[in-house]
Image (cartoon, rainbow, N blue to C red):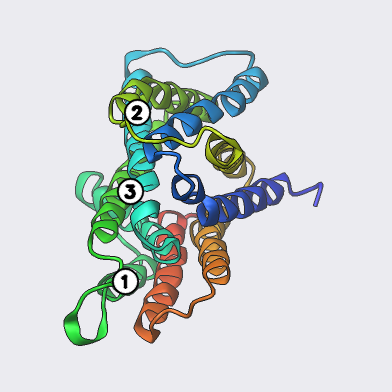
Amino acid sequence: MSGRPWLVYALVTTVFWGVWGAFAGLPVDHGFPETLVYVVWALTMIPPALVALYKVGWRVKTDARSVLYGSVIGFFGAGGQMLLFHAVHTGPTYLIFPLIALSPIVTIGLSMLLLKERVSRTGAFGVLLALAALPLFDYSPGGSGSSHGLVWFVYALIILGAWGVQAFVIKLANRSMDAESIFFYMTVTALLLIPVALAMTDFGQPINYGASGPGLAAITQILNSIGALTLVYAFRHGKAIVVSPLTNAGAPLITAILSLALLGIVPQPLKVVGILLAFGAAALLAIEPDAEAP
């Protein structure tokens, strides 16, 4: 294992993100607003960012292109996080995270449209699986719609789009930026949106400031932030063709399993099919960018 640091990093990301996803909605359920959960998440980005900057001697890319790329990456990522905290409060995590895992379909689409890249057979099959999975997530026999409503589904689609665009810009940024600079800008933009989150918070309502509120949020969100940093290093030391499927499909799988175990429910058969199709599609879509690499 010591000779394969990328595997350690990738497994940390997969496990940390999987556990984080399963418990991300608990602070809100205990009376801590999702907007304040966002604030806690933004603050938990600081320690990993300091570690990353320390490893490169506190050097950050500050040219105009890097600032632009970093800002776009950060705002799409942070905006998606802000919406995610509300989504997991309104819908089932065991469906939300497998759905969001399909974000590479957006990345691939943008690469084909803007960079004129060609999709491989692997990617094409992944796209087909994703398209087959999407309508199953909110299907309910009798046409009555999901018992959770449509709001979470719309939020998940928006997050899917935002993180798909973010990944596309990260792809562009990696040509001229180091990973530590990208993570630095992700942290800065997350912190810049804190006033927006605070302005959206209804402080007139009772807020749980105890251990099950901000305390639990800090524990879950530090898993999110550390996972993001270890992913950076997993890609640095390993091959994306292995790292991407492991994290894109593995983490949502852990989230889904933990969520279902905690809830003690069995989804409708077609939703189970949708989840399985999503996992398969996420793995294939994640492989696609490097499928033709030598």
Q: Earlier in the sequence, mark 2 or mark 1?
A: 1
Q: Residue at x 43, y 35 (%)?
A: 207
Is 144 positioned to the left or the right of 266 in the image?
Answer: left
Do the residues under discs 3 and 2 have CB atoms within 8 angstroms?
no
Q: Amino acid at mark 1?
A: Phe
User: Is label 3 or label 2 in front?
Assistant: 2
- Seen from the viewer's position, the closer of residues 231 and 221 is 221
Q: Amino acid at mark 3?
A: Gly
Q: Secondary structure at mark 3?
A: helix
Total number of numbered discs in the rendering = 3
Find disc 2 in the rendering and name its residue. Answer: 203
Q: Residue at x 25, y 65 (%)?
A: 149
Q: Is residue 172 visible?
A: no
- As drawn, the label of residue 39 is none
Q: CA distance from mark 3 to mark 2?
A: 33 Å
Q: Quadrant of residue 141?
A: bottom left
Q: CA distance from mark 3 to mark 1?
A: 19 Å
Q: Position of residue 187 (x, y in %)?
A: 47, 25
User: Is label 2 or label 1 in front?
Assistant: 2
- As drawn, the label of residue 137 is 1
- Seen from the viewer's position, the closer of residues 45 and 174 is 45
- Seen from the viewer's position, the closer of residues 100 and 175 is 100
- As drawn, the label of residue 164 is 3
Q: Local crowd at mark 3 within 10 Å, few (<14), some, or many (≥20)?
A: many
